[in-house]
Image (tube, rainbow, N blue to C red):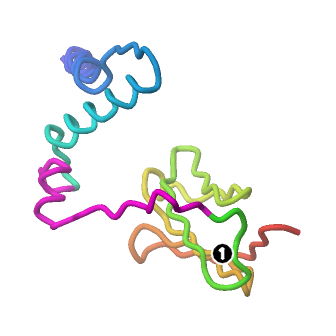
């Protein structure tokens, strides 16, 4: 019985989330990505959103995305002072990847987001996650 349910779930995922698609080029891929995103955001419900679809949740919250100005460019180096925050999803390998560093984190943070705050002047990295339950601080230098 469990195997039949697993096969049914796999078939459902293949048909709805992972359909086979061939793209004729970058423009076609962009177009189909937008179609998939619209479908996903209006049809897939999440328990983390209290059973709502992403579109319903955004509407309820009054969320309006702020897009970068088309003329914006990302910095090519870190500032000399201040703080830089990195938000990362910790995958099953348990690695937090910040700049060129890879830091192994505890098992309880797998599939959770953490925030790593780099304090530039003091060269400290503060990692926080899982609500107030996890905090780690370590020395961190971007370049020797």
Magenta residues (range): 49-74
Depicted 33 relative to depicted 90: above or below: above
Side of 112 where 118 appears, left or right = right
The residue most toward the right is: 144
- Helix, strand or loop: magenta stretch: loop
- Residue 96 picture quarter: bottom right
Considering depth in this image, is 99 or 108 the residue closer to the camera?
A: 99
Residue at 79% in and 72% down: 141
- Residue 122 picture quarter: bottom right
Side of 96 where 13 appears, left or right = left
* Residue 7 drawn at (x, y percent): 26, 15
* Residue 34 drawn at (x, y percent): 30, 35
Depicted 106 relative to depicted 143: above or below: above
Depicted 136 relative to depicted 10: above or below: below
- Is residue 113 covered in magenta? no
* Residue 64 drawn at (x, y percent): 24, 63
Considering depth in this image, is 18 or 3 the residue closer to the camera?
A: 18
The residue most toward the front is: 71
**How many discs mark residues in the rendered view?**
1
Q: Quadrant of the C terminus?
A: bottom right
Label 1 element class: strand
Q: Quadrant of the N terminus?
A: top left
Q: Which residue is mark 1?
A: 125
- Is residue 69 covered in magenta? yes
* Residue 47 drawn at (x, y percent): 18, 51
């Amino acid at each position: 019985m469990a195997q039949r349910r697993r096969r049914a779930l796999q078939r459902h995922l293949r048909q709805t989330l992972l359909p086979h698609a061939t793209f004729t080029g970058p423009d076609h891929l962009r177009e189909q990505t937008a179609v998939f995103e619209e479908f996903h955001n209006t049809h897939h419900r999440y328990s983390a959103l209290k059973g709502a679809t992403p579109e319903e949740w955004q509407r309820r919250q009054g969320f309006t995305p702020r897009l970068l100005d088309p003329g914006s460019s990302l910095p090519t180096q870190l500032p000399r002072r201040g703080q830089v925050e990195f938000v990362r999803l910790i995958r099953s390998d348990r690695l937090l990847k910040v700049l060129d560093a890879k830091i192994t984190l505890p098992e309880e943070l797998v599939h959770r987001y953490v925030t790593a705050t780099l304090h530039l002047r003091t060269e400290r990295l503060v990692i926080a996650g899982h609500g107030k339950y996890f905090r780690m601080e370590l020395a961190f230098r971007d370049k020797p």
